[in-house]
Image (cartoon, coloured by chain):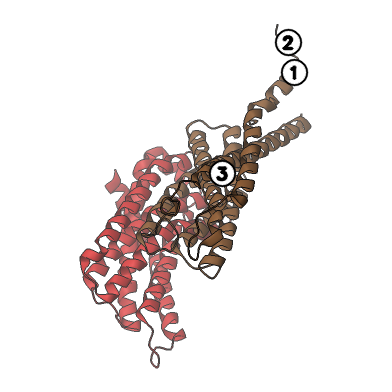
Amino acid sequence: MRLPHTSSSRIFGEINLAHHALKLWLKITTIILLAYTIVAGLLFDVPRLNIVNETIRALYFHVPMWFGMVVLFCVSTVYSIQYLRNPSIQKDINSVEFANTGLLLGLLGIFTGMVWANYTWGSPWHGDPKQNGAAISLLVYLAYFVLRGSVDNEEQRARLSAVYNIFAFAAMIPLIFIIPRMTSSMHPGSGGNPGFNMYDLDSNMRMVFYPAVAGWILLGIWIATLRIRIRNIDEKLIDLENE
Amino acid sequence: MILTLLKKEFTLELRRKSVISGLGLYLFSTAFICYLTFSLKQNQITPLVWSALFWITILFTVINTIAKSFIGEKKGQDIYYYSIANPEMIILSKIIYNFLLTLILSFAGFLLFIILLKNPLADTGQFAILLVLGSMGFAASLTLLSGIAAKANNSNILMAVLSFPIVISILLVAIKVTKNCIDGLDRSVSYNDMITLLAINCLIAATSYLLFPYIWRN
């Protein structure tokens, strides 16, 4: 039986918190995967290699964070495309918050990469094409937030930032995926260097790496959905105050 | 339609001679400051410093040039264009026009650099091709950004902030090829980079073409 349409039930129906929340089983999976990543990543046996030594464990933290960033930025771009096709505030909020969380994971990825570089390359910032590309791609999203800050009209802000988001994403593809592969880079897996498939002779690392990737990506999505829900509640509160 | 719009851009540009001469002076001043600060009568700069100075000069001149393509327009003018032309034609004509302008400015800059800072290039022909491709990339990426920045507050700062991360991929490839030109390597060495640059240009131009109608509709 349906409830009668009183104004309060409509408001609470619209808030509908469960809609954007991550499913409970996914949350539990995220926690289990990340707990496993931390324990297994720090304790399990890893191949002994010159120079790299124990720092190979960065593979379980640095690399998946970077993957997570790319996934979140992709999701953000998809929401931007959807916004342009069919505008709604919800898509704009989704797009912004996924970009925000992607930026967070990107910063974490850069810092963990710097820790790794400090012990293998000798200095935290080595001017490697991969590092520079990472820094520039973060600049893109910082510029995105500056753009959002400097447009007053809400609808125009959403549209312009959606356009910039898509444009920046297209311009970033060569920067992250093509140029580092063409220049001499010391980063594993580019510029002719062996990637982790070569290091990992007995495939033991895969047992931790794949769960780590899934775990960090899920954590990013979880944070993003939480932020989206907070933003939705804020919007709702402002609406209620205005009424 | 494109031709009419292009003709309009050129007529407007020739009518406001102060803008184009201002840009020329901007370019000259920057090149001259490079000359003075390195006091080149006594000192020599290495070819790599030359290439860095050249591309920085071109980058700033070009950003200022293209920024005016939408920012400089009077209020209400866009509504008029909106009523007579479709957005795809407008962005295409602006990109082509900016490309020609950028091309002229970058060759002028190159000439100035040869006069003031010597010519370290071993392969000038290839460098000329690079300048054409580079101008194409700058025009394709910056025209759309100018359209975005024009709609926001403090558009001049925003134009620079938005464009730096986008043009860096073009700039990186260009600097790499410039080094090959300086070293006089065989053209087949830079062939791949040239193709990459062309591909980046096409990607960015296609994205601009697709996205422009959305910032135009207001």
Q: Given contact means CB atoms under 8 Å apart, are the residues at marks 1 and 2 in contact?
A: yes
User: Mark 3 or mark 2, which is nearer to you?
Assistant: 3
Tell me if mark 2 has few (under 14), some (14-19) or many (20+) residues whose alpha carbon lies within 10 angstroms of its own.
few
Q: Output the letter for the chain in red.
A: B
Mark 2 sits on what residue? A3
Residue at the spot 35% in from the left edge and 53% down from the top edge: B200
Mark 1 sits on what residue? A9
Task: Give the Cα separation between the discs numbered 3 and 2.
Answer: 45 Å
User: Relative to the observer, which residue lies in front, B29 or A216?
Assistant: A216
Q: Position of residue A169 (x, y in %)?
A: 46, 47
Q: Amino acid at mark 3?
A: Ala
Q: Colour of chain A?
A: brown
Tell me if mark 3 has few (under 14), some (14-19) or many (20+) residues whose alpha carbon lies within 10 angstroms of its own.
many
User: Relative to the observer, which residue lies in front, B34 or A52?
Assistant: A52
Asked if marks 3 and 2 fall on the same chain, the answer is yes
Mark 3 sits on what residue? A212
Write down the chain letter for disc 1: A
User: Relative to the observer, which residue lies in front, B144 or B164?
Assistant: B164
